Amino acid sequence: NSADAAYQVALNRVQDAREETRQRLALLQQRRAELDIARQQLQETALSAPFDGVIESRFANAGELLAAGAPVASLVRVD
């Protein structure tokens, strides 16, 4: 009968909505993980000198990939 058909249609819509919700939550979790990785990578790009000074010469350019511990610039202390 039509009431049973309408109920079945509504039930299918609920199941579809639940599945879409699960998929979107999984995508959200993935995007949050990607954001955490991007934040960590950004944090690892910051350089700070152990003293106040100015850059005397640069050994690398912005965006250049360097090995860990590779010199980036030469600093001159400012007193």
Image: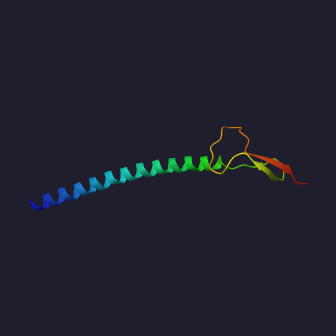
The relative height of residue 33 versus residue 17 in the rendered view (above or below) is: above
Camera-side residue of 70 and 30: 70
Q: Is residue 47 left or right of residue 25?
A: right
Figure quadrant of residue 65: top right
Assign the C terminus to one quadrant of the image: bottom right
The residue nearer to you, when weighing 4 against 45, is: 45
The picture places residue 7, in percent across and down from the top left corner, at 18, 58
List x then y, in percent, for residue 78: 88, 54
Q: Residue furthest right?
A: 79
- Would you place residue 53 above or below residue 65 in this image? below
Residue 26: horizontal and vertical position, in percent?
41, 48
* Residue 23 in picture, x, y percent from top left: 36, 50
Q: Of residues 77 and 23, which is closer to you in this image?
A: 77
Residue 61 horizontal side relative to residue 20, left or right: right
Which quadrant does the N terminus fall into?
A: bottom left
Q: Which residue is located at x 41 percent, y 51 percent?
A: 25
